[in-house]
Each structure stands twice: as structure tokens, then as C-alpha cells.
Image (cartoon, helix red, strand yellow):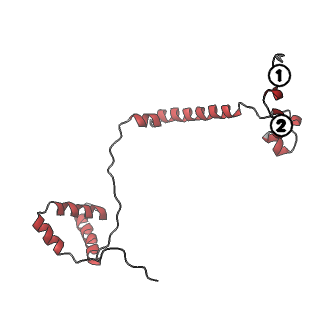
């Protein structure tokens, strides 16, 4: 049914006729035949982007429903949960004499004797906590026992 009160579709928007002649459907491009010969309109539908958005929303809703049925929480449900405070971890690097580094392996072996696997970082942190509880004089004695190490990065060899 044609509405006599409305102008033809091509004249409603400026440049629509030029766009109509430039735009060809993907099927016509792939076969090389004109779109009209395939029984398809030459102009792409203006509702195609809207349909794509609706389809994307439908897919997202379906995934969310499947996740809820599977017992997983959706992103919205995750936001509702109270976030656990995370400890800030700091990465650092340092140098130490080979003898001190070998002590790490010896301490790992001692931990295995009491059926406790220990990581290098755990041993270093435990050492820091042990030093922290020392009195100032005992801390000074422990630090004086250490062999001095040059600070800074080693120079590059050419």
C-alpha cells in the first residue's frame, strides 16, 4: 500500500538517490550480479544496525541466563558482592652474595624436614618479621654480621 501523502522514499532525504546508486548488497558484490537481478533492494535497510544491537543484547541476555543456571554469577551480581580488600604486592629486585643466596636453599630444605614447602619470598618475609621483633641493639649486631654489598646496578660490559 502506497501512502499518497508522503513523497517517494528517495526524495525524503538529501542524497538518498546517490546513496541508492552507490550501495549494493553484500550478496550482489560476491556474485557480481546487480542487486535488483537477485530480487533484493539496492539500499541496505536502515534497521540493520538496530537489529544487530537487538541481537547482541539477546545473546548477552542468553549468556547471562545460562551462567545463572550453571551457578555462575553475572557481572551485575559480582558488582553487588562486597569486594575483598586486596593486599598490595610490591615487586622489587636486589643483589646478595652467593653465600646468602645459598642459605635460601638450605632453609627450604629445613622447611621440608618439617613437611612445609617454603617459597623464597616466604623465607625472606619470615626473616623480615624475625628481624622486626628484635631489639635495636640485637638488630644492629645482626646487620653488622652481614658482608657489605655495593649498591646500584652493575655496569654494562661492552
Foreground residue among 69 and 73: 73
Dot 2, crowdedness within 10 Å: few (<14), some or many (≥20)? few
Compared with 141, 18 (above or below) is: above
**Quarter of the image where one finds residue 119:** bottom left
Who comes first in sequence, dot 1 or dot 2?
A: 1
Pointer 2: what residue? 18
Foreground residue among 4 and 104: 4
Q: Can residue 119 be seen in this view?
A: no
Pointer 1: what residue? 7
Q: Is residue 110 visible?
A: yes
Badge 1 marks a residue whose secondary structure is loop
Q: Residue at point 37% right, 77% down?
A: 154
Q: Residue at point 27% right, 67% down?
A: 108
Q: In the displayed structure, does residue 111 sit left or right of residue 32? A: left
Query: Which residue ends up furthest to the bottom in the rendered image?
Result: 158
Badge 2 marks a residue whose secondary structure is helix
Q: In the displayed structure, does residue 1 sit left or right of residue 72? A: right
**Quarter of the image where one finds residue 41:** top right
Q: Residue at point 12% right, 65% down?
A: 136
Compared with 135, 150 (above or below) is: below
Alpha carbon separation for disc pair 1 and 2: 17 Å
Amino acid at each position: 500500500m502506497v501512502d499518497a501523502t508522503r513523497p517517494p522514499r528517495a526524495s525524503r532525504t538529501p542524497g538518498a538517490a546517490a546513496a541508492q546508486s552507490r550501495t549494493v548488497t553484500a550478496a550482489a558484490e560476491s556474485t557480481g550480479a546487480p542487486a535488483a537481478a537477485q530480487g533484493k533492494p539496492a539500499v541496505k535497510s536502515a534497521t540493520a544496525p538496530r537489529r544487530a544491537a537487538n541481537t547482541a543484547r539477546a545473546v548477552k541476555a542468553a549468556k547471562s541466563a545460562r551462567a545463572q543456571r550453571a551457578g555462575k554469577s553475572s557481572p551485575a551480581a559480582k558488582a553487588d558482592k562486597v569486594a575483598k580488600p586486596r593486599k598490595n604486592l610490591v615487586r622489587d629486585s636486589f643483589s646478595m652474595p652467593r653465600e646468602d643466596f645459598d642459605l635460601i636453599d638450605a632453609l627450604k630444605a629445613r622447611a621440608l624436614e618439617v613437611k612445609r614447602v617454603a617459597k623464597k619470598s616466604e623465607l625472606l618475609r619470615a626473616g623480615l618479621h624475625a628481624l622486626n621483633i628484635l631489639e635495636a641493639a640485637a638488630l644492629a649486631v645482626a646487620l653488622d654480621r652481614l658482608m657489605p654489598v655495593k649498591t646500584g646496578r652493575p655496569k654494562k660490559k661492552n
